[in-house]
Image (cartoon, grey):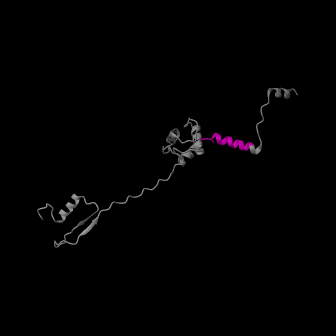
Amino acid sequence: MARGNGIGTGVVATLTALLLVGCAASATVPTIAADDEPSPAVTTEWTTPTPTPTPTPTRTALHMAGDAGNDVRELQARLKQLQWYAPEITGDYDTLTVEAVTGFQDKRGLPATGQVDQATWDATSARVRPPAMARSRSSSALIALTGLRRAPAASPATQAASAAG
């Protein structure tokens, strides 16, 4: 061991010096052969592992907070018929809709996520009659196709004239 500078010359001393200096990229580490003669240097490189990319999650919910449109209106109408949703039907999947869906799911033994998946959609469909909007559209279409309308009620004067004559 060399004296004077305080650093040894053996394998352990070299490794210790590298660690103390903070060698981060690579190090040359001498190895000792069986006959105690130094062998050629071996280079060891430290690398940072490459992170595994996280797959983008696929959407399994049919409807969730932030959605809007006719399907959300239909959902709100179904929940209203089931007395889980009291506010005005807006078509916006807001916090009140999330709360109504969560309550419905919990009561029916479904995962209470507040998001409408196929099982939740089917469960609401099975428990309600078609929303009023759908019924009024189909009634209007039926009237347009058949020309059938309910006759207007007769006024009292008309009723009296028919009875007299």
Residue 54 occupies quadrant: bottom left
Q: Residue furthest right?
A: 165
Residue 157 occupies quadrant: top right
Q: Residue furthest left?
A: 3
The magenta span reads 126-143
Residue 132 lies, with reference to residue 3, above or below; the image says above
Q: Judge whether residue 154 is colored magenta.
A: no
Q: Residue at x 21, y 62 (%)?
A: 15
Residue 163 x %, y %: 85, 27
Residue 102 lies, with reference to residue 24, above or below; the image says above
Provide the major secondary structure of the magenta segment: helix
Camera-side residue of 60 and 111:
60
For the C terminus, the quadrant is: top right
Q: Is residue 1 visible?
A: no
Q: Judge whether residue 127 is colored magenta.
A: yes
Residue 90 x %, y %: 58, 39
Residue 145 lies, with reference to residue 4, above or below; the image says above
Camera-side residue of 74 and 40:
40
For the N terminus, the quadrant is: bottom left
Residue 46 x %, y %: 30, 62
Camera-side residue of 13 and 133:
13
Count the labels in the image: 0
Residue 21 x %, y %: 22, 58
Q: Residue at x 25, y 69 (%)?
A: 42
